[in-house]
Image: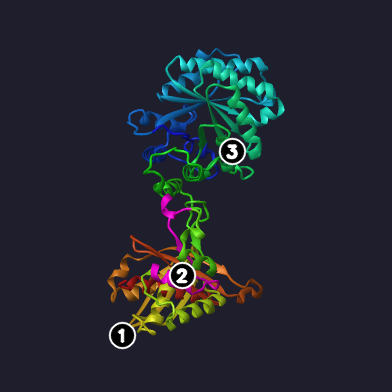
Amino acid sequence: MKPQVEIYDTTLRDGAQGEGINFSAVDKLRIADKLDAFGVHYIEGGWPGSNPKDMEFFKQAARRKWKNAQIAAFSMTRRKGMAVENDDLMRLILEAKTPVVCIVGKTWLLHVTEVLRAKPDENLAMIGDTIRYLKDRGKKVIYDAEHSFDGFADEPEYALATWQAAEKAGADCIVLCDTNGGRLPREIAKVTSLAKSRLNCAVGIHTHNDCGFGVANAIAGIEAGATQVQGTINGYGERTGNCNLISVIPTLELKMGLKCLPAKSLPKLKELSEFVNEVANMRHDVRAPWVGQTAFAHKGGMHVHAIDRVARSYEHINPEAVGNFRRVLVSDMSGRTNILMKAKELGFKLAPDAPETREITSRVKELESQGYEYEAAEASLALLIRAALDHNPELLFTVETYHVSMRRDQKESICEATVRVRVGEEVAHTVAEGDGPVNALDGALRRALVKFFPKLKNIELTDYKVRIINGTTGTAAKTRVLITSSDGKREWGTVGVSENIIEASLQALVDSMEYALLKK
């Protein structure tokens, strides 16, 4: 089925201009493969000649067969005072061997006269010459009209003349760009609607997020008639970023009923978002709309009670439609429904009116008032529920004593931890060094336990977070420690709270080890 809106991805070019983003040629190819499988229509690989990585990408891309996407190379109009056939930019973009080229040109008279230092008519000629030259060589040409909305606000007739020059030269699509990201949705809609009425070729929209309107402005442009949307995965880009395709795509498909991707793609949206973050070495945004960890997380007791009966009462879509899932959070704001649903999620069976359910709810509220937090420490919560249901079962092991010290030599500081652990009738007394007190304590505890529980060899601490709970008491303040552990297949979080950061860390470490040893 022909898409009603084309998706043009510029993560590898515009997105790579974002602070902290640095893709290798291999990174670009991996992301392009993922985007192609996902079903986007255009993948902009970069600017030929701008750096060796982009040229290597285009060299490798030309050898591959792409299932869904067309690879696009990006460049600018010919330079002023130069014949188009003599401009090295044209040679480089042709050497990229892409079926599609995207050319950026000036719309705003301010840029023409003050930045390019060119005459208005010469800019029109630069646009027309470049597009005709590339069309004559068999390329599909997308024209990015830079600063379309700022230019139109200052000199509407000149802005329109630049678009018409591109259309006359044969541009397949003219993309209106809110390059500075400063326009409001109503302005985007007004100008896009006018462009549609004065042009016969396809019109696209390219927005930035400087005012937080990147996605809203793209949607406004599409509602006004644009049939191509340009953006990046996770909104990477210059300054505050580009229009986020991860938000635009499900909005088009699920809210507006506009077809833009193969039917099988949307449930892979979260996977795509996280894949690109991983390749870019960026943290996942837990609050990202649609795909974030908290996008379908419910905490308030009233909310949880409602979704337990009718999910759509507090969820705008089925989370699985975009590859996400529902999460029920447990905190001091929780009701019994939170506990029941969370227990079920963790593998426990609780009856609504059982005394254990009331006990667990009360205990969670009590501990949270002391500074514990179970939203990111589900393993500690599972142990709490297990203790209530089994009526305080015998512990697999007990830490009887521990000691942490630090010594300093001329070159470095060395932390050392000693732990005495009891397992049944046996006792293990071990010592370990580490990069810090917690690392040393983790090593000593693991060394003590591994001879009793060999499976702990595969457990590693992957994240460690500290939060001061009541900062007004200075160095005597309570500290909350959250630890994330992994066995290579799954991850779990545990929590500890104490005025002593080492004690809080030990609580979380002990919970982590104990959870790892549970059969279920």
Region in magenta: 317-345
| Residue at numbered disc 3 | 220
Q: Position of residue 297 (x, y in %)?
A: 49, 61
Q: Earlier in the sequence, mark 2 or mark 1?
A: 1
- Looking at the rendered structure, the kind of residue marked 3 is Ala
- For marks 2 and 3, give the one nearer the viewer: 3
Q: Give the structural element (helix, strand or loop) at label 2.
A: helix
Label 1 with label 3: CB-CB less than 8 Å: no
| Residue at numbered disc 1 | 424
Horizontal relation, residue 331 to residue 420: left or right:
right
- Return the mark for residue 438: 2
> Camera-side residue: 93 or 269?
269
Q: Where is residue 384 in the image (x, y as percent from the top left)?
A: 43, 77
Q: Where is residue 202 in the image (x, y as percent from the top left)?
A: 52, 26
Gap between marks 2 and 3 measured at Cα: 52 Å
Q: Give the structural element (helix, strand or loop) at label 1.
A: loop
Residue 104, located in which quarter of the rendered image? top right
> Camera-side residue: 11 or 85?
11
